[in-house]
Image (tube, helix red, strand yellow):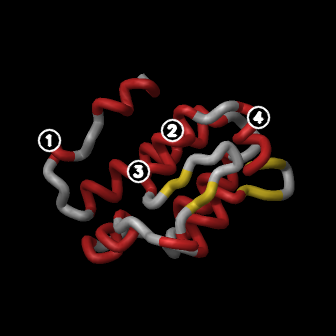
Amino acid sequence: MRITKDQAQKFLEPVAGEGRFFCQDGKIFSNLEDLAKGLAAMSAETFRYHAGSDHCHFSDWTRDVFGNQALADALWQARARRPGKAAQVAADHLLELKAAAGVPPSRRNKNWLAFFS
């Protein structure tokens, strides 16, 4: 499924209040970039709290708050692995969204993605 510019922009918007993701370790994610960065730095213990064989809070959040079923499905598939794999999934999706939203390549914040190279 191809994402339209309007959909991509909607998925990139930050959320406020109770729509944010409240991580077990105290971190708070307001948008998908926060999620990707948070997953990259997350401890295995915190990841296991939020993602296990029968649940994935990250998947639930991206689906329920943003309506992003594609990312939700990808995070569900990555749930049994490790935070780095889920972070890579989120980062790849984030770059695709930024491209679809028309964000210039120079402003897609790829520097922090060097972690995955």
| Residue highlighted by disc 1 | 106
Residue 84 position in % (x across, y down): 59, 32
Residue 69 position in % (x across, y down): 56, 69
Point out which mark residue 7 bears.
Answer: none
State which quarter of the image contains the C terminus.
top left
- Real-space Cα distance between discs 3 and 1? 16 Å
- Real-space Cα distance between discs 2 and 4? 18 Å
Decide: is 64 above or below 93: below
Residue at 64% across / 60% down in the picture? 59
Neighbour tally class for label 1: few under 14, some 14-19, many 20 plus, Cα within 10 Å:
few
| Residue highlighted by disc 3 | 33
The residue sitting at the right extreme is: 54
- Real-space Cα distance between discs 1 and 4? 35 Å
| Residue highlighted by disc 4 | 45
- Real-space Cα distance between discs 3 and 2? 12 Å
Q: Can you tell which of label 3 and label 2 is closer to the viewer?
A: 3
Q: Is residue 58 left or right of residue 68?
A: right
* Sequence-wise first label, 3 or 2: 3
Circle 4 SS class: helix
